[in-house]
Image: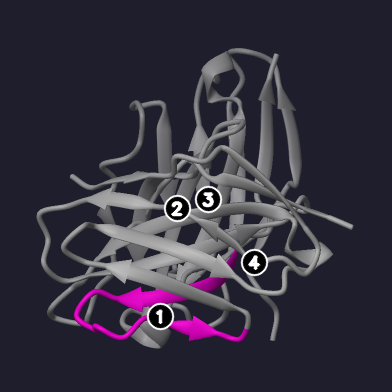
Amino acid sequence: AQTVTQSQPEMSVQEAETVTLSCTYDTSESNYYLFWYKQPPSRQMILVIRQEAYKQQNATENRFSVNFQKAAKSFSLKISDSQLGDTAMYFCAFMKHWASGGGADGLTFGKGTHLIIQP
Amino acid sequence: GAGVSQSPRYKVAKRGQDVALRCDPISGHVSLFWYQQALGQGPEFLTYFQNEAQLDKSGLPSDRFFAERPEGSVSTLKIQRTQQEDSAVYLCASSIPGGLGYEQYFGPGTRLTVT
C-alpha cells in the first residue's frame, strides 16, 4: 500500500511571492505517477501538474513546477509569482502505473495543505 | 464539453435512512472512481469501474456501501442504513485509461450530512 504525507497543514504567503509545498510518499512500486491537485473553496478538484516517475526531468506548467526526488521519495510543488486565485487546498496524490495501459488505479491522496495568498 | 456532474449537491439524511448519490461522468470516459472526503482530510478511494465492470471495491468501508454502473456511463453510490460516520463529501471522477497521463476529472461532490 502507498502512503502520501503532506507535513504542512497550512501556509500563508504574500501575493507575488514564491511558495513551496512539501510532499513525501512511500511505495514499493517502481512505476507510478504523482500529481498535485488544487481544491478551491467551491470544492471542484483540478489537476495542477503531473509527473511520471520514469522521467527524470521535473514537470513544469507555467508558474507551477515540481522538484521530484525519486530516491528520497519527495515531490514538492513550487508556485512562482503567487496570485490571489491560488488560494486553495493543495493535495499531493500517487497512482500506480498499469503496465498494460488498459486500466487505472485510484489515487492515494495526502491530507492536504491549505495555501492562503495574502494581498 | 460538460464536465463530471453529481447530484444532489447536498443531502441530509436521518441516521438509518438509505441514500443514493449519482455521478454523470464525462462522455466517453471509460474509468469512473468514487472517493470519500471527510472534513479536513484528503479524499479516500472507495471504488473503481471500467465501463460497467467494478474492478476494485477495496475502499468501500462496509457492506452498507454499494456502487453500480449498469450501462457503463452513469454511476450510483448507495449507502444503506446511514450512520453519522458516513457524513462526508463524496467525490466522483472519470478518466480515459492511459489517456492524458491518467488525469482524473472530478465532479463538484455531494455533501452528505447524517443527523
Q: Could you classify mark 3 by the number of other residues whose Cα lies within 10 Å: few (under 14), some (14-19), or many (20 or more)? A: many
Q: Nearer the viewer, residue B13 or A11?
A: A11
Mark 3 in CB contact with mark 2 (< 8 angstroms): no
Q: Secondary structure at mark 4?
A: loop
Q: Which mark is residue B96?
A: 1
Location of mark 4 (residue): A18
Query: Mark 2 is on which residue type?
Result: Ser
Residue B111, x across and y down, in percent:
69, 38
- Is the same chain shared between marks 4 and 2? yes
Q: Nearer the viewer, residue A88 or B80?
A: A88
Question: Which label sits on residue A22?
Answer: 2
Amino acid at the residue labelled 4: Thr
Question: Image point 44% across, 56% down: which residue?
Answer: A92
Range shown magenta: A46-62
Q: Amino acid at mark 3?
A: Thr
* Residue A99, x across and y down, in percent: 13, 78
Do circles 3 and 1 both sit on a common chain? yes
Neighbour tally class for label 1: few under 14, some 14-19, many 20 plus, Cα within 10 Å: many
Q: Residues within 10 Å of mark 4 (few under 14, many from 20)?
A: some
Q: Is residue A16 above or below residue B78?
A: below
Q: Is residue A23 left or right of residue B54?
A: right
Chain of the residue under label 4: A
**Residue at 69 percent of width and 86 percent of height:** B1
Are tags 1 and 4 found on a single chain?
A: no
Foreground label between 2 and 1: 2
Determine whether the residue tagged by mark 3 lies in a helix, strand or loop.
strand
Callout in the foreground (3, 4) = 4
